[in-house]
Image: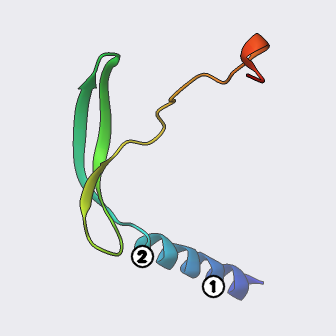
Amino acid sequence: MKLINSILIVITLVCGVCGYDSVELTDVVVTEKGPVRGKFAETVQHGIIHSAFKGIPYAKPPTGYLRFK
């Protein structure tokens, strides 16, 4: 059981390191609602660097009379 746990931990760490593709530089964009901090990320296939902003809510869910319109 210890061997299986050790192997799973090693595989998880290796996958985490291989999947890390973002550059540590941050990007701040000022919007009308305030500044938003993102980071520069690089695409895996072509190596193109772009700005990535995660966790930004785009709209509230439709509720009440707007639900099925």
Asked if residue 45 is positioned above or below residue 43 in the image, the reply reads below
Neighbour tally class for label 1: few under 14, some 14-19, many 20 plus, Cα within 10 Å: few
Task: Identify the amino acid type marked 1.
Answer: Ile
Q: Is residue 52 left or right of residue 67?
A: left
Q: Position of residue 23 (x, y in %)?
A: 26, 59
Give the mark, 2 or 1, whose residue is nearer the N terminus.
1
Q: In this orientation, which residue lies closer to the viewer: 14 or 69?
A: 69
Residue 45 falls in image quadrant: bottom left
Residue drawn at (50%, 29%) of the image? 58
Residue drawn at (60%, 76%) of the image? 9
Instruction: Give the numbered dot on residue 18.
Output: 2
Task: Identify the amino acid type marked 2.
Answer: Cys
Q: In this orientation, which residue lies closer to the viewer: 3 or 25?
A: 25
Q: Position of residue 59 (x, y in %)?
A: 55, 25
Where's the N terminus, which quadrant?
A: bottom right
User: On the image, numbered disc 1 is attached to which residue?
Assistant: 7
The residues bearing labels 2 and 1 have C-alpha atoms spaced at a distance of 16 Å
Asked if residue 69 is positioned above or below residue 64 in the image, the reply reads below
Q: In this orientation, which residue lies closer to the viewer: 60 or 11?
A: 60
Q: Position of residue 30 (x, y in %)?
A: 24, 25
Residue drawn at (77%, 11%) of the image? 65
Q: Is residue 4 left or right of residue 44?
A: right
